Image (cartoon, rainbow, N blue to C red):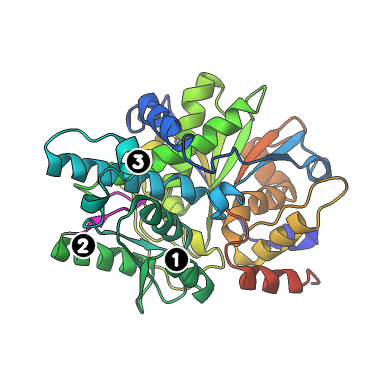
Amino acid sequence: MMDLFAKAEIRHIKGSRTASAAANQVLTEQDFANAWAEITAWDGYAATPLVDLGSLASTLSISQILYKHEGPRFGLGSFKALGAAYAALRVLQREVSRQIGQGASLSSIRSGEHAEICSQITLVSATDGNHGRSLAWGCQRFGAPCRIYIHAEVSEGRAQAMRDLGAKVIRIDGDYDASVALARDEAEQNGWFVVSDTSWPGYSEPPRDVMAGYGVMTRETCESMDQAPTHIFLQGGVGGLAASVAAGLRQYWKDGAPRVVIVEPDLADCLYESAKAGRATTVAIAEETIMAGLSCGEPSQMAWEILEQEASDFLTIPDSIVAPTVRLLARPQGNDPVVEAGESAVAGLAALIAARQNPELSQALGLNAQSRVLLIGSEGITDPEIFNQIMAENDDG
């Protein structure tokens, strides 16, 4: 099977990592602390597992692979549960406070004290699946109507999961970026509130809250480790996950923070192209990647501010190595535990495996026998039909 990874075309460009101010200014320690205090108080909160893939690390001739498995998060299947639901609560807090003329606490929104007002505040977003599912779940918990915009390639299973949580789902013919544009336009026309994981000029508070919510995952991870990893491979998308984790690691480990490697599909490489151009750059999505959650052509400006300073490397990977990586986790080597992961969860691991089959790329990334690599397994099985199709395939050829 390793032949598949050895043959994979991996593009690499160096970042311009600097002594970062953005990691402490775009997302502050207080932003993360506030999100931690709120989310860890929610019913059903539990830290997700940090899995040690010792046998695979030995196969790849590195010291350690730690995989943060977000599949069990709040029963929603992904890390997104931490972001959209928390950002939704913060939007409701701000609007309720405006309407009653005084500050409303998060706990008062959560407890239903302002249920009548919340029932009149419609929250909307575009999604590839997981963000919308988290928003729908949050709206159901907090009593707000929810509208979710999805593009043509989002699976029906993911759409139904959002409907099951009470959301009205609107499917369009275009791609993810078109669904973002429609959500923004219709929200503006109707007085609804967008809860997006990507920022644009004049729109920053909800994306900042989304990224602050993701910090719960990073803090759990850091508090489970006795030393910093040497590397972290982070999947791209609009950049919100990667920027939040990079900022959280910088704040926790200071100068000892790990080398940040960004991984994207070669079919949706807006962060790679941003690194090439030296500024946030939008790319056209000509073909959808199997990594549905990473099929994004326009980076979040706020996320890019952090990644421009924190990321050391940017990689793109082909879809051909994604399904084999899903199967490798589900049918592990040696004594490694079984991990059932979604397609977007494995981008970092797929890139790591491919890099270790390529001595020149390994050297360029500073990977060696002493490397300790952290991976964020961002989702579990969020669409059982797709997962079953992947598992029914084989790695021959």
Residue 379 part of the magenta segment: no
Q: Quadrant of the C terminus?
A: bottom right
Pinpoint residue 14: horizontal percent, then vertical percent.
Answer: 51, 41
The first of marks 1 and 2 along the sequence is 1
* Residue in the foreground of this view, choosing between 152 and 352: 152
SS of the residue under disc 1: helix
Question: Which of the numbered marks, if any, corresponds to residue 162?
Answer: 1
> What residue is at 43 percent from the left and 51 percent from the top?
271
Specify whether 30 is left or right of 162.
left
* Residue in the foreground of this view, choosing between 164 and 371: 164
**Location of mark 3 (residue):** 209
Count neighbours of disc 1 (C-alpha within 10 A) and say few if under 14, some if 14 to 19, many if 20 or more: many
Type of the residue with mark 2: Ala
Q: CA distance from mark 3 to mark 1?
A: 21 Å
Specify whether 40 is left or right of 329.
left
Type of the residue with mark 3: Asp
Are dots 2 and 3 in contact, CB under 8 Å?
no
The first of marks 3 and 1 along the sequence is 1
> What residue is at 45 percent from the left and 59 percent from the top?
133
Count neighbours of disc 2 (C-alpha within 10 A) and say few if under 14, some if 14 to 19, many if 20 or more: some
Type of the residue with mark 1: Met
Specify whether 206 is left or right of 45.
left
SS of the residue under disc 3: helix
Which of discs 1 and 2 lies nearer the camera? The answer is: 1
Part of the protein shown in magenta: 192-199
The answer to whether any part of residue 315 appears in the image is no
**Location of mark 2 (residue):** 187
Which of discs 3 and 1 lies nearer the camera? The answer is: 1
* Residue in the foreground of this view, choosing between 43 and 83: 43
Of all residues shown, which one is farthest toward the bottom? 173
The secondary structure that dominates the magenta segment is loop
